[in-house]
Image: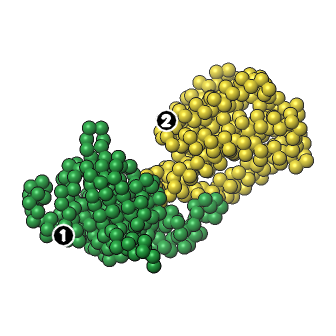
Amino acid sequence: MTAATNSAKNAPLLDVRGLSRRFAAVDALRDVNFSVEAGEVHALIGPNGAGKTTFIHHVSGALQADSGSIHFAGHDVTKLSMHRRVGAGMARSYQITNVFLGLSALDNVALAVQGRPDAGSSFRFWRPVRTEHALFDAAAGYLEQVGLRDKQQSIAGNLSHGEQRALELAMALATQPKMLLLDEPMAGTGPEESARMVELIEHLARHVTILLVEHDMDAVFRLADRISVLVNGQLICTGTPDAVKNDAGVRRAYLGDHL
Amino acid sequence: MAFYRPARWQKPFAFTVLCALLALPGLMEIFDQSYYIGFATRVLIFALAASSLNLVLGFGGMVSLGHAAFFGIGAYVAAICQQGGIVEGLLAFPLAMGVAGLFALLVGALSLRTRGVYFIMITLAFAQMVYYLFISARAWGGDDGLPLSERMQFAGLSLTDDKVLFYVALGLLTAIMLLLGRLADARFGRTIQAIRENETRMEALGYPVFRYRLVCFALGGAIAGLAGALLANLTGLASPALLQWTQSGTLLVMVIIGGVGYLYGGVVGALVLLLLEEFLLGFFAHWHIVLGLLLIGIVLFAPKGVAALFDKHRSQP
């Protein structure tokens, strides 16, 4: 063990320093300092338009910041493209369900497994994919984890909204992430589906670090180890759920009408 | 658009068609219609060119309006080879594929950074650059194009015999279609089709999207180059008209008529369009009017193309 890996071990898994981004005249993100410790569920909350999704886009690499740095698992990923960050162990799910509707659930997840560096190159031109049993066996395992075992052969477009959200999670898991970025996993789900999703995330949190963006406060306070509050592109508070609940600034800016 | 999955009837059907085609030159000779051997060869060559565009457009989702550049470059490479004394197709055809493929790699590397209408425009611009380059190149015949003083050989057999050229074109088309069919169902095909459906999602799954697109684009360019080399042999001329954007348009129309993203879309489209041209031109100089009506009809009644009509199982999104 070298000193470098030791310090990397103690450093947060995700470390965002001084992140700023302007869109025309709008300061979408202002000097955001944010970290996610390995093993925690860290929720990011804030009113609509606060910049949560913009922030997630910067962390995942869909957008590049004007200034600031992003370190992930001890590496500087500030300049890396999205697919390289995925390779480094960052997976995301989308606010709007984003699966391949024409493929079966199993095919969707197999595609995610296929994209993994350890699954080998996808520059294979001859062997039919469906004979690559390793991909599909692995994919079946992830579907089982999210409770879609019986839906393997269902076309994704025919799944219910909640099932599609779970499928989306299975695809993110299949990339074997160190950290999952979940962008409003509860969006558009009914109360029953929500409850199932909370259970599912609780279960996943035992194996993987989670950065959760969510509007459903019940879910957030149940799942999160720490909560950060983003208002107008600025982080105004980070702390345990209790600390955040009792923070005067947060109450003023946001929670007042929710709690 | 649905992902490609080989239908059960596809293999026996393709095999039957192949057998019929093998017998075709013999039959035409018996009925004293040898002229149509040349026509059939033309169909095979355009089937190859349209299929190469279908790989890029139908499977890769890249609407290229510059595909004729690779087609024409293939023809010119063949003509230049022939004039330079390289008359063996086993040498010249791979060379045509290589040059067209490399040029596609270059065009792709620059244009695949753009999307949508910008991509269409930049591929068109590259193709027009090539067109004007060849038109102004005296050494390569300028406006008149570059003639082949005689057809090449393939594995020692002279292509001067129409039947030999037909069989060589048939063999190469069969080989390429076999490759495309395997490819579409393999990891690579899955990957490029998924990128066509949802590029961002694939990026978020860790796929280097640009790289897969580029390889798909270059492969399509190389196959178009092969078709061009064959066509130069058939017509005895590498013409700048082959490089023109209207040629790209013709290939696009073939793919749309046949069925975008269907394995045999390009083949069916080339057959339908060339048959129409051949027979309507006999009656009617303005056959393009009929073509226009046909296109409207297809868009209205068979928006997925003729090939889609044979495949009832694939109506999923």
Most distant residue in the front direction = A3
Q: Chain of mark 2?
A: B
| Chain of the residue on which disc 1 is drawn | A
Picture residue at 86% right of the left edge, 36% below the top? B84
Residue projecting furthest to the bottom: A1
In which image quadrant can residue B41 be found? top right
Quarter of the view holding residue B132: top right
Neighbours of disc 1 within 10 Å: few (<14), some (14-19), many (20+): some
Residue behind mark 2: B118
Instruction: State the residue at coordinates (51%, 43%).
Output: B113
Most foreground residue, B89 or B8: B89
Q: Quadrant of the N terminus of chain A?
A: bottom left
Measured in 3D between alpha carbons, the distance from the residue under mark 1 to the one under mark 2, in whole angstroms, is 49 Å
What color does chain A have in the rendering? green
Q: Position of residue A129 (x, y in %)?
A: 58, 64
Q: Which mark is residue A240?
A: 1
Q: Which chain is yellow?
A: B
Q: Nearer the viewer, mark 1 or mark 2?
A: 1
Question: What amino acid is at disc 2?
Answer: Tyr
Q: Is residue B126 toward the left or the right of residue A99 in the image?
A: right
Element marked by disc 1: loop
Q: Is residue A157 left or right of residue B106?
A: left
Does dot 2 land on a helix, a strand or a loop? helix
